[in-house]
Amino acid sequence: MTIPPVRGRIFSRPSWPEATALKAALRTETVGGALLLLAALLAIAWANSPWHESYAALRDLSVGVDWGHLKLTLGHWAADGLLAIFFFVAGLELKREFLVGDLRDPRRAAVPIVAAVCGVIVPAATYLIVTRATGGTGDALRGWAIPSATDIAFALAVLAVLGSHLPAALRAFLLTLAVVDDLIAIVIIAIGYTSDFAGMPLLLAVAPLAAFTFLVQRRITYPLLLVPLALLTWGLVHASGVHATVAGVLLGLVVPVRPRKGRMPAVSVHGPKTDVAHVFEHRLRPLSAALAVPVFAFFAAGVRVVGGGFGEAISDPVALGVMAGLVIGKVVGVFGGTYLTARFTKADLDPGLGWADVVGLSFLTGIGFTVSLLIGELAFGAGSDRDEHVKLAVLLGSLAAAALAALVLVPRNARYRAAEAREEQDDDGDGIPDVYEYEQTR
């Protein structure tokens, strides 16, 4: 008798170590998302108050030195400097997922990667189609990448408001997809939005980056050694004309994510088996979520809509393209990529989940903020009329995507709570939920 092979499953539960790391990361990102929302609301309120000129004056205050184009406004320091921390953490996370996380298994990695790629291509195509159809030409097409990235902190903050208890598998998918499309976005920024390129500073940046790599690969983590090298790498990349956040990703990708045989791993609060990437992530993720992204949001989200500018902004072909890309393009791209991958590989959804769950999650990926606002500034110039229209479109599109996600996910919360209770049940009291032990012994 021949036993038929078991078909693959998508959105299966992650391993217990992966679920533990995921829960810690998402807890930090959820708190960061709440701070991001508060910062954005404060910026919008101030920008539309009688004291709006003081907000603009603060955002446009120049500080720094003339060397290497480092005399920047506070808004630019937030976008070029603080967001480098955000992308450093993204680089760490991506490398960890693919080298030691569950995504080292190509079968697990395929779905979020395909969904992320489709979730970039389809919104970009939607933007171009809608923008051209509504009369946009010339420089309006430069904003094609604005609706490409999901803001994981914003999305998780929305989830917290909705009271959703998404299963661990769906949360892992959302986090991984967001990290992958952030990486795609930074590649787009490096290639498509680099102006006044200077090759010599970029070549010089190789030296401090190589020194940083040499030290971290040997598990030397002294801040007095690493921070100056990281800052020098960042400064030289910035001086080259390439967006400085690229330096953050490069620095994150060279950090080792597993102990080297025969060597002691870096000292960490997590225990002797924790390596350098975990140390850095433990230290920098809270800084990224609680400071870097909210400060950027504060300086980037202050769009002025009072005084008759609202109608002009939302009728701009660029704004229409951004909103369509976030609300329509993202759900079509992410859901379509996931569905086609499942059908092509003949994989089944994990028991207890339905395609409606994937639709709701796909709407959540239409919540764009940090990277969308950054690309808007790069495409049209910070403070320009078109940039202001992009900010409003990103806010409105994200709110619409959140509302549509709520319509799908909130009615399913009872099912999610039951699934969460099963995932947390620990009858033997050993600290590991029973479902994970059961799956490890099958």
Image: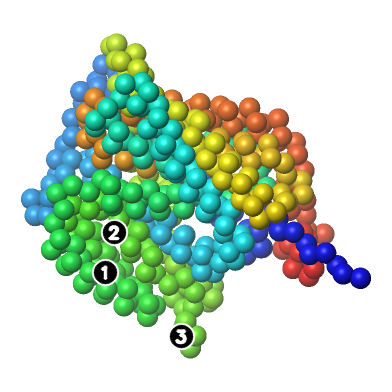
Quadrant of the image occupied by residue 198: bottom left
- Which numbered marker is on residue 247? 2
Q: In the depicted view, which residue is nearer to us: 184 or 37?
A: 184
Q: Amino acid at mark 1?
A: Leu
Query: Residue at the location (83% across, 64% down)?
Result: 4
Residue 23 percent location from the top left of the image: 59, 54
Residue ID for mark 1: 209
Query: Residue at the location (35% across, 37% down)?
Result: 144
Residue ID for mark 3: 263
User: What is the C-alpha distance between the residues marked 1 and 3?
Assistant: 23 Å
Quadrant of the image occupied by residue 125: top left
Q: Residue furthest right?
A: 1
Quadrant location of the C terminus in the rendered image: bottom right
Binning the other alpha carbons within 10 Å of mark 3 as few (below 14), some (14 to 19) or many (20 upward) gives few
Q: Amino acid at mark 3?
A: Arg
Name the front one of labels 3 and 2: 2
Q: Amino acid at mark 2?
A: Ala
| Number of marks present in the image shown | 3
Q: Is residue 370 above or below residue 278?
A: above
In primary-sequence order, the first of circles 1 and 3 is 1
Q: In the drawing, does residue 109 fall left or right of residue 379?
A: right
Query: Residue at the location (31% across, 41% down)?
Result: 374
Considering the numbered disc 1 on the image, is that residue within a helix, a strand or a loop?
helix
Residue 1 percent location from the top left of the image: 91, 70
Considering the numbered disc 3 on the image, is that residue within a helix, a strand or a loop?
loop
